[in-house]
Image (cartoon, rainbow, N blue to C red):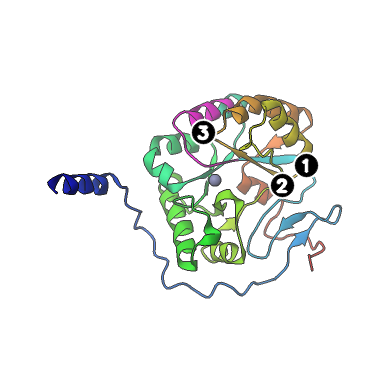
Amino acid sequence: MLHLFAMLAAVLMTTPMLPRTHTVTPLPRFLTPPVSREILDPEDGSLTYGPYGQVWRVPMQRREIALTFDDGPYPFYTPLLLHVLERSGVPATFFIVGRSAQEFPALVRRIVVGGNELGDHTFNHYTLTGLSDYQIAYQIAAGGAFLQQFTGQPVTLFRPPHGRYNQHVVAIAHTLGFKTIFWSDSPDDVKNISPDIVVSRVLYYARPGAIVLMHSGQYKTIEALPEIIYRLRAAGYSFVTVSQLLRDGNYDQPAQWPIKP
Ligand SMILES: [Zn+2]
């Protein structure tokens, strides 16, 4: 019996507590959208902006592109990835899991010191569509609040785990002051594919204002990255953080493009 108590105490002592620097109750009424439609690119009908602050791609003329990396930080992969980015002078946006940031804070500091941007990928990386509104709000708010200590200012970008979302998720994020950042270009690098395929898929979907989703815990992606950077630069692209992309694309005054019925 004593042994059992000792085990329980050990588990409790090593289980990290959630940060308590935020409050999310009582919840406001989320679900009345300001506009119930999405703004489409007139050329190909692809998604750009959504009514709850969602962003798939930033419509723009100039050849800017934002590399984004989900998950982590990871003790092995993140320093390698940062090395490639720093050597190339490329800033990126890292969607960080609060729980992992709590475990490896020095890596989060290195990401920030390297001139990269942090985005909120929730505190525990649960699939949000299976949670209650309160739990969704808590996961988003706790992740953002934890990352704020590294940035010194509120984190405003959010990406749902596994890209899984519904109207509740994006509306709650919007209410909490986050833009939900999706992507327009992804090599699907969580699958078992070669670095060459990672490169060719990223290049295939690249276009001005694109947001590229990759994963920081994939060695093949880190292997592919120098070639991706070299080829995109050769095609005239420059690399910016997601916030910079939004500023350069005048996100606050979106073009009056066709809206999805
Ligand atoms: Zn993720």
| Label 3, label 2: how far apart the Cα atoms are | 25 Å
- The local secondary structure at tag 3 comes to loop
**Residue 247 belongs to the span the image colors magenta:** no
The magenta stretch is: 69-84
The answer to whether the residue labelled 2 contacts the one labelled 1, judged by CB atoms less than 8 Å apart, is: yes
Mark 3 surroundings within 10 Å by alpha-carbon count, few (fewer than 14), some (14 through 19), many (20 or more):
some
What mark, if any, has residue 114 been given in the picture?
A: 3
Examine the rendering and report whether any part of residue 34 can be seen. yes
Mark 1 surroundings within 10 Å by alpha-carbon count, few (fewer than 14), some (14 through 19), many (20 or more):
many
**Amino acid type for the residue under numbered disc 1:** Arg
Horizontal arrangement in the rendering, residue 5 relative to residue 217 (left or right) = left
- Percent of width and height locating residue 82: 53, 30
- Percent of width and height locating residue 192: 63, 32
Tell me what residue is drawn at x 30 percent, y 47 percent. Answer: 15
| Near-viewer residue (133 or 259) | 133
Q: Which is more N-terminal, label 1 or label 2?
A: 2
Give residue 211's quadrant in the image.
top right
Find the residue positioned furthest to the front.
Answer: 1
Q: Which is more N-terminal, label 1 or label 3?
A: 3
- Percent of width and height locating residue 255: 78, 60
For the C terminus, which image quadrant?
bottom right
- The local secondary structure at tag 1 comes to loop
**Amino acid type for the residue under numbered disc 2:** Ser
- Percent of width and height locating residue 253: 71, 60
Tell me what residue is drawn at x 39 percent, y 37 percent. Answer: 104
| Label 3, label 1: how far apart the Cα atoms are | 25 Å
- The residue that label 2 is drawn on is 184
Find the residue positioned furthest to the left.
Answer: 2
| Near-viewer residue (37 or 195) | 195
